Amino acid sequence: MKYTHFISDLYNVEAQVARFAIADKPTEYHVMFQVTRRNMPFAEQLNHLQGAFKEFNTTRISSAKPVFVRYFLSDAHNQIELLQKSLNNTPCAVSIVEQAPLNGAKVAMWCNFQTDVEIESSSDAFIVKHNGYSHIWNTYLHSSQGTSEDQTRKLFADYVELLRKHNVSLADNCMRTWLFVQNIDTNYGGVVKARREFFETEGLKNDTHYIASTGIGGRHADAKCTVVLDAYALKGFKPAQIQYLKAESNLNRTSEYGVTFERGTAIHYGDRKHLIISGTASINNKGEVVYQGDVNKQADRMLENVEALLAEGGASVANLASVVIYLRDFADYATIKAWADYRLPDVPKTFVQAPVCRHDWLIEMECTAIVEETNAEFAEF
């Protein structure tokens, strides 16, 4: 992985870039964009971020196309209208969540770009195609009716119907989900129950597999929407290309404490593999919270768990393309920023305020890694 960093003087935006490249093969970029002038109104911060996004795409990686963008907002209710107006004809999957950037900005962006891809956009999905693969993105799925349990059940039912339109299924093709839960301390129980019961009906069980996921605090602009779902599915692969990561020396099966997601998933292509690491916290292999009340020790254990998952997939932190770090308490930001800059100095990363699904977890991280490998059995990326 090659890391670079630049600041756009024109737009007052910092960009942290991870570039994965193999000669004569598609190149992938993960970029974290963050404003450096944080005293500007939201409209100006948004304009500067989007300007830097376009500048980066046109002048630095003109051969790449944007695939995915997530906007982290500080106040979705008061920011969503302006953001949505700015998104007309945005040529990529767009995720939106209220998770306030902890650096004091009103908005931040996480972006993924790829070369040598074809884009197909419809009203119900954003699809990236290349070499026989179809990457299907569905973002910002939400409902305003009922409890968090009701909404989760409806979101997954709607998502399954969207997948069926593309001749794929939840059990066979979904690789990754995000569940952003408003007031997670109260509403997460309903999310867990609905997901577990819905997965059972779709053939996702402890003795088969689940889906890599992050379930974390976050909210929609509409206070009635207690859950927002983002999801990524893959079409055109062989079952042997998928590896589920357990790291049982460090972690237990999530089903042992009633939740239903995979710790991580590796997708093997002919020339590389993608490792998707779910939201990971300071937990041991008995499912217990480790180092309650100590954010520094929790951060160390969290990273130890992530490293164990990466190692099982044949990777390390040197292969990381992006990291999102979630903190329950904004007062821990300075401490954890210094910790992350030391432990993960070059990796594109962003820090947002988002309570984790257990009260005692002070910090959680998710990440993506890319590793070069050769496997003639599978089609290249």
Image: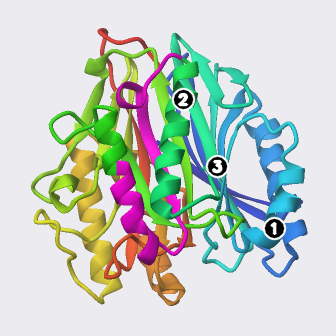
Q: Nearer the viewer, mark 3 or mark 2?
A: 2
User: Dot 2, crowdedness within 10 Å: few (<14), some or many (≥20)?
Assistant: some
The residue to which callout 2 is attached is 161
N-terminal of the pair, mark 3 or mark 1, is 1
Between marks 1 and 2 in the image, the one whose residue lies nearer the viewer: 2
Give the residue at x 48% y 42%: 156
Asked whether 106 or 21 is in front, the reply is 106
The one of 27 and 143 positioned closer to us in this rendering: 143
Determine the residue positioned at 63% across, 25% down: 127
Q: Which of the pair 120/191 is nearer the observer?
A: 191
Which callout, 1 or 2, points at the residue further toward the start of the chain? Answer: 1
Amino acid type at circle 2 is Glu
> Where does the image place residue 166, in percent across and percent down from the top left?
56, 19
> Is residue 136 found inside the magenta-colored segment of the image?
no
Which residue ends up furthest to the front in the rendered image? 146
Residue 172 magenta:
yes
Image position of 379 (left or right of 297): right
> Label 1 neighbourhood size at 10 Å, few (<14), some (14-19), many (20+)?
some
* Dot placed on the residue nearer the N-terminal end, 3 or 2: 3
Q: Dot 3, crowdedness within 10 Å: few (<14), some or many (≥20)?
A: some
Q: Residue at x 80, y 62 (%)?
A: 80
Residue 72 percent location from the top left of the image: 66, 63
| Range covered by the magenta-colored residues | 167-195
- From the viewer's perspective, is 310 left or right of 233? left
- SS for dot 2: helix
